Image (cartoon, helix red, strand yellow):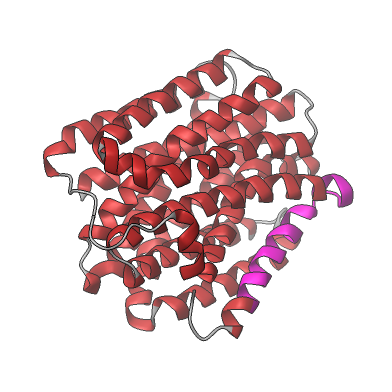
Amino acid sequence: MAGIIATVSVFAMAQGLTYPLLSFILERQGIPSGLIGLSAAMTPTGFIVSAPFIPALSRRFGAIRLAILCSVLAALSLSAIAAIQNIWAWMPLRFLLGFFANPLYVISETWLLAITPAARRGRIMGLYSSIVSGGFAIGPLSLGLVGTEGWPPFLIGIAAFLACGLIVLAATPRLPDMPREGEPTSVGGFFKLAPLLLFAVFVAAGFEQILLALFAVYGAALDSAEQRIASLITCFIAGNAMLQIVLGRIAENLGSRRTLLRCVLACLAGCLLFPVVFDTWLIWPLVFIWGGVSFGIYTLSLIQLGERFTGQSLIAGNAAFALVWGLGGILGSPATGVAMQMIGHQGLPLSLGLLSGALAVLLMTKKRLG
């Protein structure tokens, strides 16, 4: 279990660094926010395209070999991004980064859900999400230490991707087999089994990827320094990391669906307060809590997945989660970027508020998630 969590946490560090780093670079080049959002959407597009192939590829070639290969290819993709400082060249390269990164998430989360005892699922998945979020937090935090110019920040990400493959290789004797019981379920077929659960993942993805991609643009519109924005992003992700265990324990006592609804309502409240407190000290606790409850939507969705599905349906469900996570990024970032061009920087909290409000309404009108 420790090897599984370590793999994804190191990988998350690389992902957490990549989004704000590339946005800062493009912002300095004078690229419009709509194009910055479109560029950011290329990585989740890679998630979407690769997701349907993961269950079959893991059965045919083995999950361990697939994970190691993808970590190496992701490192090569980021190396090419660092070498070519051009937004149009970055489009296909960021797509490849997402394409090769996605199997690591799907395989690791399937391994973890398959071996987690039901009675402890909330706290273990909360611990998993906390550690992974910690990896995301280290990514943007490292930008404050090495800056956003030249090769140093890219080298951190490249090393992290390669470390993922080394961790998997070292943990190989202790890694479980992929679950094979039950009838094979396609990713498309899983959409019919749990549509609302997948929409919750879509909203969680939208929150995280929109903020990581466009927070720098929002801050620049208000003349906020790059270092302050990077620190606020770190604070947002620190909330992810520190609150997931708490949310997991609450889910064990209160129920995952009821806890999920409370997280969504808290996200909506954060959207309303964000523009009001941005220039005050209150932005720091707000962003911290906002980060925890927004990523908590994904943690609680994972708990629901483990409660409701087993065997090959579990693999398909994890792959569907990855696909929908990609959709949240590919649709959310460009749409929010365009909204910010049309109505100004407040298009950011408005877009996030619409996402969380829609999910809140659906959860309150459904007796059962899915």
Residue 360 magenta-drawn?
Answer: yes
Q: Which of the pair 236/213 is nearer the observer?
A: 213
Residue 221 is situated, as x and y percent measured from the top left of the image, at: 80, 42
Q: Can residue 121 be seen in this view?
A: yes
| Residue drawn at point x = 35 percent, y = 50 percent | 131
Q: Which of the pair 237/223 is nearer the observer?
A: 237
| Residue drawn at point x = 59 percent, y = 61 percent | 203
| Residue drawn at point x = 64 percent, y = 57 percent | 283
Q: Quadrant of residue 215?
A: top right
Q: Is residue 141 visible?
A: no
Q: Is residue 301 left or right of residue 219?
A: left
Residue 189 is situated, as x and y percent measured from the top left of the image, at: 47, 61
- Magenta-drawn segment: 340-361
Q: In which quarter of the image is residue 41?
A: top right
Q: Which of the pair 228/344 is nearer the observer?
A: 344
In this view, 323 is above or below 296: above
Label the magenta part by its dominant secondary structure: helix
